[in-house]
Amino acid sequence: INYPDENGLTLMHLAAIHDQGDVINCLMRYGAVIDISNGNTDETPLHLAAKHNACAAIKALVQNGSIIDVVDHNSRTPLHYACNHGCNEAVESELLTPLHLAALSGYYEVSEVLINNGAKVNTPDSKNRTCLHYAALSNNVELMNLLISNSFVFFSRDNSGWTPLHYAAQNGFETCIKFLISDEATVD
């Protein structure tokens, strides 16, 4: 069920491309790997669904636990493609703001412009992650410092109970870990 064709596409990839949410749910019941990479471009089914504006597939993939912040060979997440291809349902379902996206991509200057124009640093997404969680995932200490200096809630926990420090540790981002610990992060 997880065997790829000559283009590196599995049944899950094909269902995602063709907006087959029911097929995705069926494949999951039979043990399909939801975040399998296509091997050629490191795209998951969620990347491909977002590229093809396949909203039913996106919904099924997210509901089945697909990872929304995994990057492909271009360092793009499925959300990058959803924004780029006008799939507003996908963007709205995750409650991601432009500042979340800038933080995830590590864009300091863009984040600074957004904050200076009223973007709210502490707004959580659908998984209770703040911009600081995403900045930790982007391994950008300068950006984390900007966010903390404009925030009143530093180290909130997401729905998994993780703080930004957890994400930095999971990814081995030593500089971020040192920064977060030095900035009075709660270490649990």
Image (cartoon, rainbow, N blue to C red):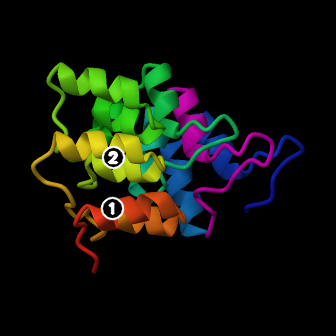
Answer with mark 1 or mark 2, whichever residue precedes in sequence: 2
Q: Are marks 1 and 2 in contact (CB under 8 Å)?
A: yes
Which residue type carries mark 1? Leu
Quick one: 161 or 163, which is closer to the camera? Answer: 163
Q: Is residue 88 visible?
A: no
What label does residue 21 carry, if any?
Answer: none
Which residue type carries mark 2? Met
Query: Disc 1 designates what residue?
Result: 180
Query: Quarter-wise, where is residue 91 in the image?
Result: top left
Q: Magenta segment: does it hold 88?
A: no
Question: Is the residue marked by circle 2 packed among few (<14), some (14-19), or many (20+) residues within 10 Å?
Answer: many
**Residue 160 % position (x, y):** 31, 69
**Residue 6 % position (x, y):** 90, 44
Report, in whole angstroms, how far the alpha carbon at label 1 lies from the one at label 2: 9 Å
Residue at the (65%, 42%) spot, across then down:
72
Q: Which residues are magenta?
A: 31-53
Query: Disc 2 designates what residue?
Result: 144
Horizontal side, residue 117 vs residue 80: left or right:
left
